[in-house]
Structures are given as C-alpha cells and as structure tokens.
C-alpha cells in the first residue's frame, strides 16, 4: 500500500512534464513544511465511479505547487493510508482561507470532501472560469483535457480516470493524478489575463464566490416524502387522461381524421391486440373463460379436456379444440362477448374510434402537424413557438401533463432518491443566459401548474424541528425591465405596489378595459394613498372580462424577458398572427421607452456579436455565428434583407441582459447569505437547500425561523440593490413546513 508520495517533475519549455519525473516516499512533516509556505496550491481528488454523491469513496488527494520555474512539486496521498492527524492537517490546508485552492470542476472536490467533513474555502475553478470567458456557450469544450490543449497544447491521457475504485495505487495512477495538478496555475494565469482584457473580473469573482453555495445545495440535498410523491402520481392520472382526451378530439375532425385512418392511428372497427405468441397472455385470457385451468400449453389443455369433457358445455369444448389447432378465433369471439370490458381495461382491445396515435412521438405527430403547419420542420419548442394552430398547444399541454406520471412518477424515486432519503441535483453554474441549469434531476422543472399546484414541491420536506424559509424576488424580471427602461408607468406601479399587468391592460385597451369592469371591481376600488388622498387601488380583480385582457398583456410583459415573437404570442393567446402583431404594436405605442430599450439591446447584439448584463458585473454572452454573418448586419438592421441568424441574435440580445441580471442578483444573494451563515457559525441551524431562478430556499431550526426570515429578507434586498440601486425590487420571504412556490 502506497501512502505518501512526493513527485518532483521537471517542466520542459513547452510546459509538459519531462521524462525525469522522480517519485519518492516522504515523511509527512515535509508536506507540512511545504504547505505552510504556500499561498496558492493546485488540488485534485480521485474517487470510485458511482453516480450518487453520498456513495462516493475518496481514494486519493493530490496537491501541486504554483510557483513558476523549472521544478514543480506534486504530492500524491492515498486517503485510506493516512493517519487521523495527517487527514486533519490536509483538512486544514483545504479549509484555510489564506491558501487559494486551484481545481478543475471544483464542485466535484468540494461536494465529495464535504461528505468527509471538509469544507473547502477560497477556490478558483478553471472550468468555471472558462465558462465565464466563453459566455456559457453550450457547445464549447470545458474538460481539463480540452482547455489544456487550448492554452498549452498539451495532450492529456485520461485512461486511468475510472480505474481508482479498487484503491490499489500504481505508478500509472500516480502519474495520472499528479498530471491534474501540474498546469492549473498556468491556465489560471492565462484565463485571468483574458478576463481582464474582456472586463470580466467582476463576473469571475462572483462565480468563484457562488460556487460553494451551489455545492452546498447539492451536498445538503432535499428530503423527499415518497408517500406524498406517490399520492401525487395517483392524483395526476385524471389530469393526464383529461389532457389526452382533449388532444385526441382533434382526430375526430378533418384533416386529421383522414390521416389517422389512413395511417392506422384510428379505426372504424374494434381492434384486438392480443399476442397469441405470448404464453403469459394466453394463460391469462384462457383463465377468463376457464378459471380452473392452470396454463395454456398443449399438454395442459389436453389434460384439462380429458378431465372435464363430460361436464363441459359443447361451445367451451369447441373453443379448446380450436385452440389446440392454433385457431384462436373462437377464443377471441368468446372473450369479446363475455369479457369486453376486461379486454379494454387491460389493453387487449382498442374500441372502434379510439385513437392509438402516440402524441409523444415526433415521427407520428410531425406529419399530422404539417397538415396545418406545412413549414414545420420539427416539434422543438423553438419551432412550435412559430406556429399558432391550437392542436399543437393542446399537444404541448398533454406532454406536460404526461410528465406528471412519467418524469415525476415512480421512476423519479428509483433514479433520484439517495440512500439517505434525499434528492441531490447537479448545477451547471454558467449557461448562456447567465442563469444556472440543473440536471439529474432537474429541480428547476419540478412541476408547478394550475392543475396540480405545488403538490409535487410540497412532497419535499424538512427534518424534524426544521422548517423551510424561502425568499423570492417579487416580479424580478419586470423590475429589471422597469429599471433599465425607466418607463414611468412601470416604475410607478412597482413603487406603489399596484398590479402592473392590470395597469398595462388599462392603458393598452383603454375604453374596452373600462367597460369590462364589474360593479365590485377591485382595480377601480378607491382607497387612501400614502399621501392621505383617495386613489384607485389598482389591484388584480376577479372580473371575468378583465382577466382575459389582463392575461393577454401579462403574456407580453413576461414575454419581453424571453424575446417573445408574434408567432409565440399568437399561439399562446390562440389568436391570429395579424391580431398578435397589432396587439404588440399597440403595446409598444403605449410603452415607447420599453420598446426603445429592447430595440437598443437587440441592435447592440447584432452590431457587436455579444451582449452583456447590467453593472457592476457586465456578464457577456457571445454569439459564435455572428462573424459568419457580419456582412449582413446593415441590410438586416435597415430591413432590406432579413437574416435568420442575426434575427436569433437580436432576440437573444433582448433576453439575456434581463435574465442575466436576475441571475447575477441571485448569485450575489447566495454569496451574502452563505457568508452570513458561516461567519456567524449557523451551519447547524440554517442550510441552503434549493435555488430556482428568482427563489432561494433554506431550511432553518424552527426556534430561529422568524429571526432568520427577517435577516434573509434583508440580505436578499441588499443583493438586489447591487444591481438596482433604487431599491424598487423587493423580496417576499416566507416560512413553510414543506417546499412551496
């Protein structure tokens, strides 16, 4: 067993490890002396290969020096061979904030080491830095091998990566391990220079500070009440059935009906789908007619006939004799006559007129959709957003409903609930919009719909004596738009706590809005304002006609943050494209400052090939295909010739500054809140457990919940003021027994 290895490696002029790498067993005191003299070290760990964070076994830990010169020192430690005192010193090195730790994909090291009682502090992650520099570009390569080649032209061999699980250390494994802590400092130096040139140092600092907070969320996980979750599955079944019924009704009308009949997705006659080559099916169906038969093989059926022929009705005897000749028609006819409901319930019989189209299958649905949307190339969200036919909207609603029992069914428990009863998500901390994404599972997509409310979220619960304290920014994206555009109506509504969507609807629809008011309309109710004068309450009302008009304008208000097109709006409101175009034009006539702001951002993106968020961070998103279309910028801007790529850049440029600024704000809040928890030694009382867009969720001991609610609210507002100094954006902070919206 190899415990402590010191590696002295000569770095060649091209920054590769030389041939004269020396390995030697060392006294641990030598490592102590070395570590105490460092202000910056490279760090990497190796584990066994397992999917679940709480099951990973730490095999080795490697350190590397960060001093420029000919000689590099790396240290390789087999974790299981270390004494408790040696592990304690390594823990100190990782935890002390006075030593900067360089790692690649540092969340991996951070989360695994947390399960070993170590909280890594002061981190620089070369992978995260690369994502910042590339603007979160989805198709870029961020692995260590990729950026080592990019910056240093070094080819890294990763063959040994999955071989550490046996905890047997070999020279090959040592060389693999120390290679991962040989070049990070050089890469960091080059990344830092690029970040300085691109004015991204503030973003870089924010992401490094936020990394421990995101990693803490993964480490803590969220406890799932599996019984509650299963109750949701049962409650969702009628929701799915209703959505399926609605979308299937389209096959009752033309041109869909003829297509479905022609392609076998619909029939005017009953269709039996019994598989007579399946022994289990034959046994099951035989026993419907002959309850005491023990099987369907030839020998068993012949024996059954011999024992029962004398007392068996002749029609039953004829069924069995035909069965032995593999003539299943009499059996099927008897089943249809006597057990029709059973056959339908157990999917052996499809009644006449019942569709069999798989609405989740693109090959089956796309040709159907092209009957009414001939230009449709696929069923992606981007393509569907350019269509208006309500059939496609109903299909989307069915697909969403189906997830309630597929994505969020029993399979969710099997795949994602860890041995300790918790669900742990994986964060991609930098994506092109500036936001984060989550996977395995995607906790940001835990379903919250009108049909099921927050029941799926409510299945996530606290440990005994703890409660959830969560906070979200009220109308975050709307507040950012108001602040950037300086639109007086929006600012006045947000400052005074009015219902912005209703105010916008009143201005867009004018007399139509006024005439739609019921006698008890809450919007027109009079109240005393802060100045002591009477004013309209301007709150969301329950007037039926108002709700329709408000929804139309609300779709535009929120669509602004996502670059909504007239096609998307037409599809969402189920109106024609000319009607959607008119509605948008009217809207921007009423709110010219918002129009000017969005057009400025879109124009900036197509002229410069990138867009950025607000001060102080100025996070950038780059558009890699801009250079190939640069010569078309002016014709596109002047409306002479529309360029699809520039059109997409324009849409994204209207979207990213808003969403990205919101993400910068949330990450700042996470840093402030985590720092507060650790600086005040509250780790046992308060834990950050979830982050979804504009909402941050903690769990807190119930005895401290009211105090923490007020403090968390203050910290959220402090983060918001960094982006929006006017303080118009507020936080809504609540205490709940389970996770909610």
Image (cartoon, grey):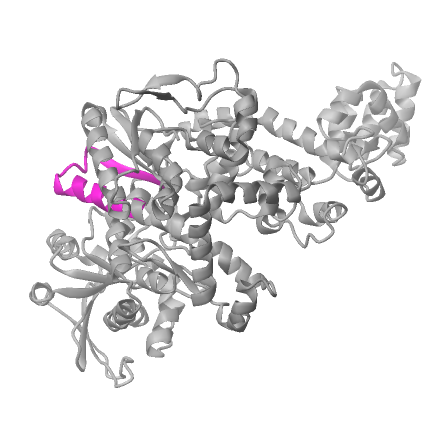
Quarter of the image containing the C terminus? top left
Q: Position of residue 521 (x, y in %)?
A: 47, 17
Residue 671 included in the magenta stretch of the image? yes
- Residue found 81% across the figure and 24% down from its top: 304
Residue 275 percent across, percent down from the top left: 78, 37
Side of 506 relative to 527 (left or right) = right
Q: Is residue 693 visible?
A: no
Spot occupied by residue 187 in the image (x, y as percentages of width and height): 28, 71
Answer yes or no: is residue 706 visible. Answer: yes
Residue 45: x and y in percent read 27, 59
Give the total number of marks visible in the rendering. 0
Residue 636 in magenta stretch: no
Q: Which span is picked out in magenta?
A: 666-693
State the residue lying farthest toward the bottom.
Answer: 13
Quarter of the image holding residue 241? Answer: top right
Camera-nearest residue between 238 and 608: 608
Question: Does residue 478 sit above or below 110 in this rendering?
Answer: above
Left or right of residue 304: residue 605: left
Q: Nearer the viewer, residue 332 or 202?
A: 202
Residue occupying the point 27% across, 39% down? 688
Q: Closest to the observer: 152 or 316? A: 152
Q: Residue at x 19, y 35 (%)?
A: 684
Say which quadrant the N terminus sits in.
bottom left
In this picture, residue 568 sits left or right of residue 507 = right
Residue positioned 17% across, 80% down in the render: 69
């Amino acid at each position: 067993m190899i415990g402590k290895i010191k590696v002295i490696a000569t770095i060649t002029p091209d920054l590769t490890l030389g041939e004269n790498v020396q390995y030697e067993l060392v006294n641990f005191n030598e490592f102590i002396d070395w570590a105490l003299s460092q202000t910056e070290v490279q760090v990497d760990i190796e584990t066994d290969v397992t999917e679940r964070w709480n099951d990973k076994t730490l095999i080795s830990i490697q350190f590397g020096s960060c001093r420029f010169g000919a000689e590099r020192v790396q240290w390789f430690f087999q974790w299981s061979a270390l004494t408790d005192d040696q592990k304690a010193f390594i823990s100190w090195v990782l935890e002390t904030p006075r030593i900067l730790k360089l790692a690649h994909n540092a969340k991996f090291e951070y989360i695994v080491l947390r399960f070993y009682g170590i909280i890594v502090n002061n981190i620089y992650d070369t992978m995260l830095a690369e994502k910042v520099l590339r603007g979160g570009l989805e198709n870029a390569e961020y692995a260590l091998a990729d950026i080592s080649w990019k910056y240093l032209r070094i080819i890294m061999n990763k063959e040994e990566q999955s071989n550490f699980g046996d905890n047997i250390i070999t020279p090959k494994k040592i060389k693999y391990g120390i290679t991962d802590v040989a070049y990070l400092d050089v890469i960091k130096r080059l990344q830092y220079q690029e970040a300085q040139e691109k004015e991204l140092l503030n973003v870089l600092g924010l992401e490094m500070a936020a990394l421990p907070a995101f990693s803490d969320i993964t480490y803590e996980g969220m406890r799932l009440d599996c019984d509650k979750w299963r109750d949701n599955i049962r409650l969702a079944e009628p929701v799915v059935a209703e959505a399926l019924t609605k979308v299937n009704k389209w096959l009752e009308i033309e041109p869909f009906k003829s297509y479905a009949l022609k392609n076998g997705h619909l029939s005017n006659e009953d269709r039996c789908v019994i598989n007579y080559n399946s022994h289990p099916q034959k046994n099951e169906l035989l026993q419907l007619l002959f309850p005491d038969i023990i099987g369907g093989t030839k020998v068993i059926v012949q024996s059954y006939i011999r024992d029962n022929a004398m007392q068996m009705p002749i029609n039953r005897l004829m069924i069995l004799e035909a069965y032995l000749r593999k003539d299943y028609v009499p059996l099927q006819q008897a089943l249809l006559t006597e057990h029709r409901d059973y056959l339908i319930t157990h999917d052996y019989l499809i009644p006449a007129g019942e569709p069999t189209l798989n609405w989740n299958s693109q090959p089956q649905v796309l040709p159907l959709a092209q009957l009414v949307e001939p230009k449709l190339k696929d069923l992606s969200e981007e393509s569907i957003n350019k269509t208006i036919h309500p059939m496609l909207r109903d299909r989307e609603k069915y697909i969403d409903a189906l997830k309630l029992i597929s994505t969020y069914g029993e399979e969710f428990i099997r795949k994602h609930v860890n041995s300790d009863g918790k669900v742990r998500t994986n964060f991609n901390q930098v994506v092109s919009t500036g936001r984060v994404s989550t996977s395995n599972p995607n906790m940001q997509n835990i379903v919250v719909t009108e049909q099921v409310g927050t029941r799926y979220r409510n299945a996530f619960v606290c440990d005994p004596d703890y409660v959830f304290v969560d906070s979200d920014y009220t109308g975050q994206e709307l507040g950012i738009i108001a602040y950037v555009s300086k639109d007086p109506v929006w600012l006045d509504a947000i400052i005074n706590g009015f219902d912005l969507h209703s105010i916008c609807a009143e201005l867009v629809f004018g007399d139509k809005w006024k005439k739609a008011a019921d006698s008890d309309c809450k919007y027109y109710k009079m109240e005393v304002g802060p100045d002591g004068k009477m004013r309209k309450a301007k709150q969301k009302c329950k007037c039926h006609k108002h709700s329709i008009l408000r929804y139309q304008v609300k779709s535009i208000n929120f669509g602004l943050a996502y670059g909504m097109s007239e096609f998307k709006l037409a599809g969402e409101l189920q109106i024609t494209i000319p009607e959607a175009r008119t509605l948008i034009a009217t809207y921007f006539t009423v709110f010219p400052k918002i129009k000017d702001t969005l057009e400025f951002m879109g124009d900036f993106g197509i002229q410069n090939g990138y867009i950025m968020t607000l001060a102080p961070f100025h996070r950038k998103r780059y558009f890699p295909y801009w250079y190939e279309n640069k010569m078309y910028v002016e014709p596109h801007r002047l409306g002479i010739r529309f360029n699809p790529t520039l059109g997409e850049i324009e849409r994204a440029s209207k979207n990213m500054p808003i969403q990205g600024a919101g993400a910068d704000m949330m990450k700042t809040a996470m840093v402030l809140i985590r720092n507060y928890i650790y600086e005040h030694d509250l780790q046992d009382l308060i834990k950050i457990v979830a982050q979804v867009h504009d909402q941050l969720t903690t769990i807190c001991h119930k005895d401290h919940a009211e105090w923490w609610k007020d403090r968390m609210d203050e910290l959220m507002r402090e983060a918001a003021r960094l982006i929006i100094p006017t303080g118009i954006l507020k936080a809504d902070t609540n205490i709940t027994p389970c996770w909610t919206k």
